[in-house]
Amino acid sequence: MLWQQLLSSPDAVRRRMALSLTEFFVVGVPGLTERVGWPSFMVANWWDTLCSMAFGNYRALLEAVTLHPAMGLYLNTAGNQKENPATGRVPDENYAREIMQLFSIGLYELNNDGTPKNGVLTETYTNADVSNLARVFTGYQLDDRGKVADTTTIPGKTIYDFAYAAKPMYFLASRHSDLQASFLGVTIPANTPGGTALTTALDTLFNHPNVGPFFGRQMIQRLVTSNPSPAYVGRVAAAFNNNGQGVRGDLKAVWRAILLDEEARSTAGLTNPQFGKLREPMLRFAQWARTFGVTSAANSWKLGNFGANLGQSPLRSPSVFNFFRPGYVPPNTAIASASMVAPEFQLVSEQQVMDYLGAMYNPIRNGFSIGNAAVNGVSTGTPVTNDIKANYAAEIALAPNASALVDRLDLLLCAGQLKAATKALIVGALASPAVTASSTESVKLNRIAAAIFLIMASADYMVQK
């Protein structure tokens, strides 16, 4: 479902923004599969939530994230209980810490342009803030009230329906802490109702001056460049703080500010070695698929274990810290010497590079086959060869002319940014075997696939500018 939407859904911009949000508000499938029934339904609803709210308001999204059952399980809000002095139990602090560290204000106080406030690293919160905020996130449960049991489908097994996987967690007052909660300069009095306490906590985080630059900088990194200038971050943060109509947290204004900023669109970035970002593996694949109109003949969109082979798959982060950290610096590199960051390089290793090339080679030429097709969800038992494949009809006529073919693919895949030397190298590699106008379609497709593969293996392509 995820790949189908990323590769072919007509609202590509919404899906792209939602994908960026999955790398900020992180829930990873591996962290759920052993903890709940119907994890795929729960993650599907998590994705639907991010998609539906991608152009909404950050404050509403923060609340939806907090109460979603996937996040509740992932960071232990679901089932979190108040303190019990008799047993020594205290509220779980996991979500309280991560909602501050990762989902809202970050570790250090920031100026609006993302630089450290007063030029020094001053922590935004203390352990006491975490412990007090954790009290707010007690009393929430997965909403499996009214669940329906099936005891006949599999004898000896009780299977409950999956409705709870798509419902926000519900509040159980008897498990909620009644203690006073003081954090970030705000105090929620003792015995405050749980809903009121949650509203106060989320409002406090939402209105913290760090949120605009903290969130904005990471979204710039996901979409445009790893090392945005402070001025760029400041303009995006300003859009977060006020969309021009007095509204804070308008995500449409944030996306607009990021994508239409002069720093994002200026040709100066094309020749600036410090501008741009390494393309994530799943984005390379999605770009190829959308560029060449990938379809699924059986409407299966089954990619098998492709994500693992690719080295990255949506919503499969190994931890809440995403696939890579925003401040990652590749050690012993020119990037490190220049005091820059390159988050996506945390994914890169010799093995990952080889896995990526190996994963892409066959799909580019032959697409994906599935073991058996299905009609209305029922397997036909019939294998489907090349079920998911690209459409190279527009490139067929150019196949005999390697130079013209590479020029077109350069435009489609690299926005015309392949270096002359890279293009010459690829054109030279395509010279043999020879392809003429009378060559078979298969021979022409071989050359097209080889050209695409070589471009997508090049450094000029790997770095998005």
Image (cartoon, rainbow, N blue to C red):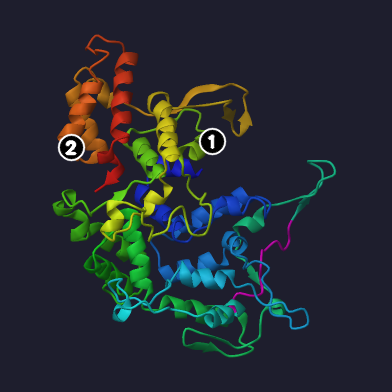
Q: Is residue 144 magenta?
A: yes
Disc 2 and disc 1: Cα gap in Å? 34 Å
Q: Is residue 301 magenta?
A: no
User: Which amino acid, mark 1?
Assistant: Asn
Identify the residue under disc 2. 419
Task: State the image coordinates of residue 399 (x, y, percent, origin top left).
Answer: 24, 20
Q: Who's the residue at 56% across and 22% down the image?
A: 383
For this rendering, which residue is in front, 7 or 410?
A: 410
Label 2: how many residues lie within 10 Å, few (<14), some (14-19) or many (20+)?
few
Disc number at residue 305? 1
Q: Secondary structure at mark 1?
A: loop
In this picture, is 379 found above or below 236? above
Taking 254 as reference, is 298 left or right?
Answer: right
Q: Is residue 214 visible?
A: yes
Taking 148 as reference, is 216 left or right?
Answer: left
Q: Residue furthest right?
A: 156
